[in-house]
Amino acid sequence: MWKSLTAIALFAVPSLQSAVGKRFAPLKFSKNGKFQISILEDLHLGENAWDSWGPQQDVNTVTVINEVLNAESPDLVVLNGDLITGENAFLENSTVYIDKIVGPLVDRGLTWASTYGNHDSQYNLSRSAMLAREHQWPNSRTQQMVSGREAGVTNYYLPVYGSKNADTNGAPAMLLWFFDSRGGYYYQELDSAGNQVAQPNWVDVSVVDWFKATNADLVKKYCKHIPSLVFVHIPTNASQAIQTQLGVNAHKEPGINDDYVLAQQGEGWCADGSNDSSYVYGGQDVAFMKALVDTPGVIGVFSGHDHGDTWCYKWDTLIPGMSVKGNGINLCFGQHTGYGGYGSWIRGSRQVLVTESKLKDMEIDTWIRLESGDIVGSVSLNSTYGEDIYPSTPDTRT
Ligand SMILES: *[C@@H]1O[C@H](CO)[C@@H](O)[C@H](O)[C@H]1NC(C)=O
Ligand SMILES: *[C@@H]1O[C@H](CO)[C@@H](O)[C@H](O)[C@H]1NC(C)=O
Ligand SMILES: *[C@@H]1O[C@H](CO)[C@@H](O)[C@H](O)[C@H]1NC(C)=O
Ligand SMILES: *[C@@H]1O[C@H](CO)[C@@H](O)[C@H](O)[C@H]1NC(C)=O
Ligand SMILES: *[C@@H]1O[C@H](CO)[C@@H](O)[C@H](O)[C@H]1NC(C)=O
């Protein structure tokens, strides 16, 4: 265990030199007008370090990351939450698991951007410490643009510049927004009864306000709405409403749909801020959903959290009971990447391919690369997504 960590630390040193400045070098579409993102989610490293199966599981997860990156050549990797299973963490080394996750990325000179999940905040694991650990590598583009206890940590945006942009003074071709849906428990806090203190599990309203104001500034600065993608660990209630009230079609929205009913932001919390019942939902993500559909240019929202759901759905209606109406925004799950966390669905990683030619029409392509090397769920999120017929995705287990 310590040996392999030392090895990672040693090989990180030369890579660190060559990667200096990476965080600040702007993201750009390639010369042929493409920008590909590989989403790694629900990695859940660090389970049961005291048993042999926990560390072995981490080895298997790193193998999945290597297999995906051998098959795909992303321009950016997104770590979309639950990097570590913090419930099992030891105070003295709870963030070292970051090193294992990013090893294959640093090795390939790739840069990454993270959102943190509900398992990334626990009594012995802090989001801020995770961010500090990430920043040991200049390859990490993860940031904290909103301060305050209620905001969480991973709220920020990254501009991606067009292939023809000679410099970065002009408008970005695309924006990537990252939101922190929080959850779990506050670091090293106990209430007067000695219980751990739960952290709310939705995107806070202070972050929604920051998003609206920051986007409005960008619209004013560049005189246009810039196409954008959104990453957030926990999906919103819209995903659950789609699943339970509209239904996910295996040929029109190909993907596994086994987490039924799926878990969403605000789950377990009442509207009054109490959290007595684990199945209550207090509607705290309504402001976030509204901001997403009110922002022209948002093409897709990518979430993890529900390991047994891997579909994309074009949300373009007012679903009975909801106050927010979909505007055609695509709500996507990825694929469980880690061997930690619940479920034995085959591991893999959602790929998002943005091409400058299709971006003009607000269209993107996406598929899931599995650890077996196979590709499933390859679809175009274009104007006829939801009507086009695709092969269904087999419900494969490992
Ligand atoms: C973290 O510390 C625990 C307890 O000392 C140990 O069992 C575990 O192997 C350590 N993890 C790593 C990755 O070094
Ligand atoms: C936190 O870490 C300490 C030190 O390793 C350990 O003794 C304790 O059991 C951990 N607590 C929790 C709640 O995981
Ligand atoms: C609700 O909050 C209390 C106090 O923070 C915490 O002990 C409990 O685990 C929480 N329950 C859930 C379901 O989050
Ligand atoms: C949340 O979704 C459920 C369906 O799963 C729906 O009945 C309810 O009205 C929705 N609530 C809000 C506030 O969006
Ligand atoms: C959307 O993409 C699918 C799959 O590539 C294709 O069959 C369909 O014709 C496309 N729709 C439009 C409007 O281009």
Image: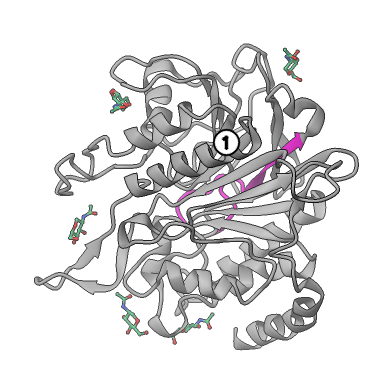
User: Under 8 Å from ligand 4: the CB of mark 1?
Assistant: no
Disc 1 target residue: 220
Q: Main secondary structure of the magenta part?
A: loop
Relative horizontal placement of residue 31, taking residue 179 as reference (left or right): right
Please tell me whether residue 297 belongs to the stretch shown in magenta: no
Question: Relative to residue 79, is residue 92 depicted above or below?
Answer: below
144 or 184, which is in the foreground?
144
**Residue at point 17% right, 45% down?**
277
**Residue at point 41% right, 74% down?**
89
Find ligand 5 in the image and state its quadrant. Answer: top right
Q: Which residues are magenta?
A: 336-354
Q: Quadrant of the N terminus?
A: bottom right
235 or 203, which is in the foreground?
203
Question: Relative to residue 28, is residue 113 depicted above or below?
Answer: below
Q: Would you call the spot at circle 1 few (<14 residues within 10 Å), some (14-19), or many (20 or more)?
A: few
Please tell me whether residue 338 belongs to the stretch shown in magenta: yes
**Residue at point 30% right, 66% down?**
186
Is label 1 in a helix, a strand or a loop?
helix
Relative horizontal placement of residue 325, taking residue 351 as reference (left or right): left
Measured as percent of width and height from the top left, residue 106 is found at 73, 69
Q: How many marks?
A: 1
Q: Residue 195's image quarter?
A: bottom left
* Residue 100 visible in the displayed image: yes
Type of amino acid at the residue the image marks with label 1: Lys
Measured as percent of width and height from the top left, residue 260 is found at 39, 32
Q: Residue 279's image quarter?
A: top left
Measured as percent of width and height from the top left, residue 90 is found at 40, 80
* Residue 75 visible in the displayed image: no
Measured as percent of width and height from the top left, residue 330 is found at 56, 27
